[in-house]
Image (cartoon, rainbow, N blue to C red):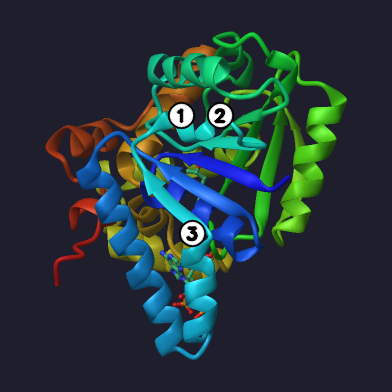
């Protein structure tokens, strides 16, 4: 593996791209508009400058990382990629379209991976003619820091594809787990319903957002409270995951909190919009 293409220059896509570039891979970050891609490049520079100012990276190291990264709107740059990791919006139709296009553009050996947080790998793979070379490669936010990668087998993922991606995750300094496809996979199936429960505790007036987060930090030793974590992940992403788990399982225990849905409708999505359960404009 030499060349990796990351589809999506948002929070996850950019961090995933940075992780690969730090490990010496040539990385292309592709998004749909010049404005988005310029913004991604600026955010990368800012994040690396922060590392330099902390003494965690020197200027030469920064140049080496940025020198390995290309930002583009041109999907054709994926033609000779060894791996494509998609981190676009959580929408099955959009993902299927992206992968149908990639399937035509990429060389036959290219492995196609999705960083989807809960959508069926088998369903996305069905948009391609290479479901044996299709896999889930699920990173965790912030992807530059979190050690886990869930490597998710779809119904037709080959053992060879699985082994290649599992080993690759180790090569980039991550600690992978093997997962068979199921809605929410492992971490999100446990984590997102917990965040949803925290939303309901706010909704039913049991405690304030601050006290719920404090309770879980001090009472369960979580590094951050569930509502602060929901704000970090993005409340829209949390809602999309709850809705997928609910639809796929048909189990009412996975019904999204009415408050979570209301906040997403209002545009209170967490850190990325400056306000979620906590205020980030201060
Ligand atoms: N982006 C990039 N780097 C970040 C960051 C961010 N948002 N937040 C913190 N960091 C970095 C810091 O720069 C620091 O790096 P350094 O050691 O090189 O200086 C390091 O992380 C530690 O940060 P801090 O000392 O400031 O803060 P903490 O020790 O409190 O750690 C945290 C911050 C790592 C975010 C920690 O609070 C944590 O682990 N929280 C839980 C995160 C979590 O559960 N993520 C999974 C979400 S689920 C998911 O992503 C799946 C998806 O499908 C929804």
Name the residue: 19% across, 52% down.
273
Name the residue: 49% across, 91% down.
55
45 vs 71: above or below: below
Q: What separation in Å lies between label 1 and label 3 (alpha carbons)?
A: 28 Å
Q: Give the percent coordinates (x, y) of residue 265.
A: 17, 32
Marks 1 and 2 in Cβ contact (< 8 Å):
yes
Q: Report how many numbered discs are placed on residues in the image.
A: 3
Question: Which residue has dot 1 on it?
Answer: 76
86 vs 274: above or below: above
Task: Look at the image and tell me in which quarter the N terminus lies.
Answer: top right
Question: Which residue has dot 2 on it?
Answer: 79
Whether the residue carrying mark 3 lies under 8 Å from ligand 1 is answered with: yes
71 vs 192: above or below: below
Question: Which residue has dot 3 on it?
Answer: 142
Q: Give the percent coordinates (x, y) of residue 134.
A: 67, 23
Work out whether residue 224 can be spotted: yes
- Badge 3 marks a residue whose secondary structure is loop
């Amino acid at each position: 593996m030499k060349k990796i293409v990351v589809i999506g220059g948002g929070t996850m896509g950019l961090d995933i791209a940075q992780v690969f570039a730090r490990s010496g891979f040539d990385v292309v970050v592709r998004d749909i508009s010049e404005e988005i891609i310029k913004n991604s490049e600026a955010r990368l520079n800012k994040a690396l400058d922060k590392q330099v100012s902390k003494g965690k990276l020197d200027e030469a190291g920064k140049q080496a990382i940025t020198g390995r990264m290309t930002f583009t709107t041109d999907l054709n740059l994926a033609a000779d990629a060894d791996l494509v990791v998609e981190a676009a919006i959580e929408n099955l139709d959009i993902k299927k379209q992206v992968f149908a296009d990639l399937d035509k553009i990429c060389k036959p050996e290219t492995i196609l991976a999705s960083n989807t947080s809960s959508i069926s790998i088998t369903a996305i793979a069905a948009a391609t003619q290479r479901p044996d070379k299709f896999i889930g490669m699920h990173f965790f936010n912030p992807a530059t820091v979190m050690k886990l990668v869930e490597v998710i087998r779809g119904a037709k993922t080959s053992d060879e594809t699985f082994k290649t991606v599992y080993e690759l995750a180790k090569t980039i300094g991550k600690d992978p787990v093997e997962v068979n496809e199921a809605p929410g996979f492992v971490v999100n199936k446990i984590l997102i319903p917990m965040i949803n429960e925290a939303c309901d505790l706010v909704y039913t007036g049991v405690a304030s957002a601050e006290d719920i987060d404090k309770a879980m930090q001090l009472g369960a030793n979580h590094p951050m409270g569930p509502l602060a974590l929901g704000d970090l992940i993005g409340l829209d992403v949390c809602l999309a995951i709850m809705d997928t788990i609910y639809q796929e399982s048909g189990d009412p225990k996975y019904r999204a909190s009415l408050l979570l849905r209301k906040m997403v409708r209002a545009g209170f999505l967490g850190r990325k919009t400056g306000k979620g359960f906590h205020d980030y404009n201060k």
